[in-house]
Image (cartoon, coloured by chain):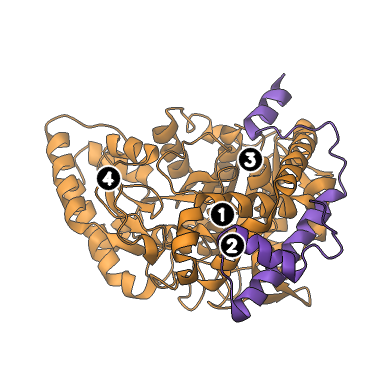
Amino acid sequence: MNKKELCFQSATELGPLIQAKEISPVELTRAYLERIEMVEPRLNSYITLLSEEAMQGARQAEKDILAGGYRGPLHGIPIALKDLYYTKGVRTTSGCKLLDSFVPSSDSTIGERLNEAGAILLGKLNMHQLAYGITGENPDYGDSHNPWNTDLITGGSSGGSASAVASGECVIAMGSDTGGSIRIPGSLCGIVGLKPTYGLLSGHGLASLAWGQDHPGPMTRTVSDCALAMNIITGTDYAKTLNSGVKGLRIGIPQEFNKMAVDAEVKSAIATAIDRLQALGATVTEVSWPLLAKAAPIAAILQMSETTAYHSDLIKTSGSKLEESIRVSMEGGYFISAHDYLLAQRARVLYVRESLKMMKGIDVLVSPATPITAIKIGLKQYEVDGKKKHVISLLTQFVRPFNVNGFPAITVPCGFSQAGLPIGLQIAGRPFAEETVLRAAHAYEQSTDWHKRRPSV
Amino acid sequence: MMMSRENYLTKELFIQIAKNNGLTPEGPYADKLYDYVNVVMSSVRALEELDVSGVEPLTLSACFEEAAK
């Protein structure tokens, strides 16, 4: 296996090879660092690269494994963290130069779990400034670039996480998703991204965007790696039912989704994916979700208020130094009254109750993750179905509803446009039904070859 | 304080709330923020159409527990 091929192996493939001492963590980490050095000038996935620390960790892993101290399937596996995960002794910028010198004194809980499992931290990943955006553009540390076409956005806010995984710059990345920030870049970069149920993964030691909608989650090249990361982080075995198939799985498609703007190539790929799931034994029914239209206003009011509260000191001391659209959003939060915030909270309860009721007769909901493929960096509007739409509302329309109700949702590659850009299928389930979501995604993935395609970068 | 939703914030009230919160928006930026805030208020209006009487602002965890009963 050459070094490039090594960098595209999954953790579930590499783990047994490391355990059997057929691949050395040192050799693997060195291959990744060389790959990063080669592609970073074009992608800009990393804000902070930890080459020396990673090699030191790899040498220790190798020593431990040779001495019979193999810790498990992530031992010696190179990973990376979005730069809002606190890392002890390593700066954590949240993609904002104002926080360039912030060095946490402890790790995030998720980081601790991955560290205890023996994973090798390669570095901290680029992101939309303060996670307040969904394109991956960043005026402070440079834009993230899509590995399938570097003129295009990665999506965000976990843009560096998605480009790093897609281009073989790490095996597993951790991202976070407040309004689609794992699934949007996951879809646009052609990888798997899981937003677990709200509260399932600890947010301790993560810089927040909006407490009530923040969801940390794994980003990987395969569904089995995603399940593996979940196993390690939660201590629950999400891989045990992965191969159970989808026979009898009840898929719901909200009729409201059919009214949303979707690019023709994406629409066609999703229809084909649904046909494939049916061929594998799933059944499909249309469902109704009348309050879906309220998801965006609920999310906007809650997010603005909470972000402003969380970043209050930063806004007061350095607000004018923030990227202007982010400054406007953050300062705008001061104008939302307590009455309006509580109205949104109460509306959210109605929305969640309706979501739960809708899911009673079905197991999963299926939709595009994003209605379009990756677009040019800098675009604010994009035309779909003959109408110009705001990029933010377009890219969040299918993903944000699941930040508001907290249900688990995954994106898995389901095709490519004629321009060679990835398309993502979103599968969402009931609260804490990650096993079902992962099982459906895995069954679909294994019946296709989309996840085997590699960007030419 | 009751505010008209037709014209959620007058410029005077906008400046007052900004000052109360220690903000000093000036020039074209102040206009941009003012316009943005008024657009956001359309989200509030969209939620005012809902009947939330008798609905408590539960957390997501409480909603999930309620459904599990």
**Residue type (three-letter) at the residue carrying disc 4:** Lys
Q: How far apart are marks 1 and 3 (CA)?
A: 21 Å
**Which chain has been coloured purple in this picture?**
B
Pointers 3 and 4 within a single chain: yes
User: In screen coordinates, is A22 left or right of A316?
Assistant: left
**Residue type (three-letter) at the residue carrying disc 3:** Gly
**Residue type (three-letter) at the residue carrying disc 1:** Thr
For marks 3 and 4, the one nearer the N-term is: 4
Residue in front for this viewpoint, A73 or A153: A153
Question: What hue does chain A carry in this figure?
Answer: orange
User: In screen coordinates, is A16 left or right of A63?
Assistant: right
Residue in front for this viewpoint, A183 or A192: A183
Q: How far apart are marks 2 and 3 (CA)?
A: 26 Å
Q: How far apart are marks 1 and 4 (CA)?
A: 26 Å
| Residue at the spot of label 2 | A331
Q: Nearer the viewer, mark 2 or mark 4?
A: 2
Q: In which quarter of the image is the C terminus of chain B?
A: top right
User: In screen coordinates, is A430 left or right of A112?
Assistant: right
For numbered disc 2, what is the local secondary structure? Answer: helix
For numbered disc 1, what is the local secondary structure? Answer: helix
Verify CB contact (< 8 Å) between mark 1 and mark 3.
no
